Image (cartoon, rainbow, N blue to C red):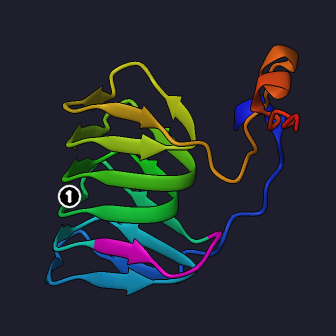
């Protein structure tokens, strides 16, 4: 884990098994683990939800989740609002939008990596703060 933080992760409530193929969109909350194939968009409806895709797992569609642990393949854009971990066998064919990223050697992304900080205010430099204040009007 990054920085040695001990975080409580959601239980994997739902499993798409190794010999399973799902065709259609998946909307979930809590934890979802994919060992099989999903053809459709995968979206989490709750903050703190986690998607895990094993080295055998394949998702063909857009992914929108707070947390993603990927060691398989995603063919589509990936939007992660909290934490993204790309394992050594991870493959993404699409753009990746992330807040916090951990990427192991061997992971591949065929698309853009776009940092989207989540919920953090932009820190202004002291000389920017003066410029941002409205000028006083003189009459």
Q: Does residue 23 appear left or right of residue 85 in this picture?
A: left
* Residue 42 on image: x %, y %: 31, 72
**Total number of numbered labels?**
1
Residue 70 lies, with reference to residue 11, above or below; the image says above
Q: In the image shown, does 124 or 42 lie closer to the viewer?
A: 124
- Please identify the quarter of the rendering in which residue 128 is found: top right
- Residue drawn at 73 percent across, 37 percent down: 122
Can you name the residue that lies furthest to the front here?
Answer: 139
As drawn, 123 above or below 94:
above
Category of crowding for the residue at label 1, using alpha-carbon neighbours closer than 10 angstroms: few (below 14), some (14–19), many (at least 20): many
Assign a secondary structure to mark 1: strand
Quadrant of res 60: bottom left
Bounds of the magenta segment: 42-48
Where does label 1 land, which residue?
58
| 21 vs 66, nearest the viewer | 66
Q: Residue 124's spot in the image, x, y percent? A: 79, 27
In this rendering, position of residue 47 left or right of residue 42:
right
């Amino acid at each position: 884990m990054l920085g040695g933080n001990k975080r409580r992760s959601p239980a994997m409530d739902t499993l798409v098994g190794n010999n399973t193929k799902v065709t259609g969109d998946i909307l979930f909350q809590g934890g979802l683990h994919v060992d099989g194939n999903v053809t459709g968009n995968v979206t989490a409806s709750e903050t703190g939800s986690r998607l895990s895709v094993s080295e055998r797992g394949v998702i063909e569609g857009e992914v929108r989740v707070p947390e993603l642990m990927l060691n398989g393949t995603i063919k589509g854009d990936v939007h992660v609002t909290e934490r993204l971990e790309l394992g050594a066998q991870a493959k993404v064919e699409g753009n990746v939008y992330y807040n916090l990223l951990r990427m192991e050697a061997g992971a591949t992304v065929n698309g853009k990596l776009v940092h989207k900080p989540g919920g953090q205010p932009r820190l202004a430099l002291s000389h920017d703060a003066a410029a941002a204040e409205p000028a006083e009007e003189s009459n």
